[in-house]
Image (cartoon, rainbow, N blue to C red):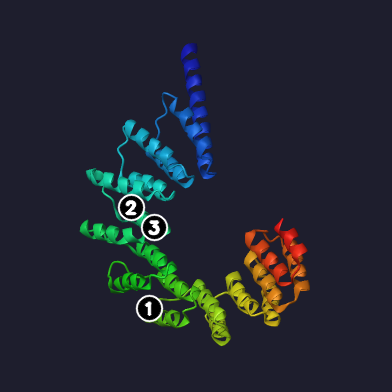
Amino acid sequence: MKNIKKKLDRKNKAKAWVTTVAEALTDCVLKKQWLQALQMFEMLKEQPFYQPKEATYMKLLVLLGRCGQPQRAHQIFDEMIEEGIEPTSEFYTALLAAYCRNNLIEEGFSIINQMKTVPRCQPDVYTYSTLLKACVDASRFELIDILYQEMDERLTSPNTVTQNIVLSGYGKVGMYDQMERVLSGMLESTACKPDVWTMNIILSVFGNKVHVDLMDRWYEKFRKFGMEPETRTFNILIGAYGKKRMYDKMSSVMEYMRKLQFPWTTSTYNNVIEAFADVGDAKNMEYTFDQMRAEDMKADTKTFCCVINGYANAGLFHKVISSVQLAAKFEIPENTSLYKAVISACAKADDLVEMERVFK
């Protein structure tokens, strides 16, 4: 009886240890500590009664992909198969994503071709969406039509998320004909309708390029299509009108937001502050900044970059110094953008000594 009890105690202690290590493994995954996670995983596998679950392998695949370790992710994938766990399209897609996140597009195509040879693991819309996003991020636009054609041949229809990714990519590089072709297809589709993200992408593309006429035209089209704007939509319009110095239209959008009870956000105020800052209109810029603070709206790094640029453009260099001090008081992160704004202000003031100090 004593021997049996001792064996049970050892077994219970071993199980408790495994539970502790498994929890530590989960914690490492959450903290994106990939090396420690692999070490914990190896320790667990040494236990004779521990059997890794599919969910654990999936977590490790995703973690390693996000941490720039696609080759290690592939090792884990192969190890999983050796353990007798049959892969699914989800596992293959996670492995493909690990390569795609690290701009290894050829390897991504290799994975998708491998999937086609496994009857139970055929690529689906999520697999293709992952590869399409990688092509967009790497500006490999010549591959997009190839993937679209392959999807069509395999009767795999792109979803709205997929199309939004491609739309954004085309828009950023000014491929408007291709962008409008995809968008027209969405408007005619019954399975892949545009959503508010689609609208925001299109408006942002034309707004950032200050093609206000095109932005307005598409806004009206989306509204006729039954699309309801959101706060980000209005912020895009305000930013574009501000860059074009169309202050009346900028103000009317803000009033319309109030009427519909859409809150003015930090981005809303930043867009207005930036519009006045760009032309050195310190008076209206200050008024907007003061209104922002009065409404307890939290200023961020962009807010202070705009304010600093505005004072520099207005030739009020003494106020640049007070703005930097106020940013420090508000504990605004001192990132590259903030330093660049201060350096630019120093250059405009011909204060080379201060410019060098800030640069150092």
**Picture quarter with the C terminus:** bottom right
Task: Say few, some or many: other residues with alpha carbon within 10 Å of mark 3 (under 14 / 14 to 19 / 20 or more).
Answer: many
Viewer-nearest of discs 3 and 2? 3
Q: CA distance from mark 3 to mark 2?
A: 10 Å
Q: Residue 331, image x and y in percent?
A: 71, 60
Q: Residue 228, image x and y in percent?
A: 43, 76
Task: Find numbered disc 1 in the image and state the secondary structure of the residue it sits on.
Answer: loop
- Give the label on residue 133, or none: 3
- Give the label on residue 127, or none: 2
Task: Give the vertical position of 216 relative to 148 (above or below).
Answer: below
Residue 54 at least partly seen: yes
Q: Nearer the viewer, residue 186 or 317?
A: 317
Q: Quadrant of residue 261?
A: bottom right
Q: Nearer the viewer, residue 267 or 344?
A: 344
Residue 1 at least partly seen: no
Task: Find numbered disc 3 in the image and state the secondary structure of the residue it sits on.
Answer: helix
Closer to the chain start, of discs 3 and 2, is 2
The residue located at (68%, 75%) in the rendering is 310
Q: Quadrant of residue 84?
A: top left
Q: CA distance from mark 2 to mark 1?
A: 30 Å
Q: Residue 54, image x and y in percent?
A: 37, 39
Amino acid identity at mark 3: Lys
Q: CA distance from mark 1 to mark 3?
A: 28 Å
Task: Give the vertical position of 232 relative to 144 (above or below).
Answer: below
Viewer-nearest of discs 2 and 1? 2
The residue located at (22%, 44%) in the rendering is 119
The residue located at (77%, 63%) in the rendering is 353
Instruction: Please name the residue that numbered disc 1 is placed on.
Output: 226
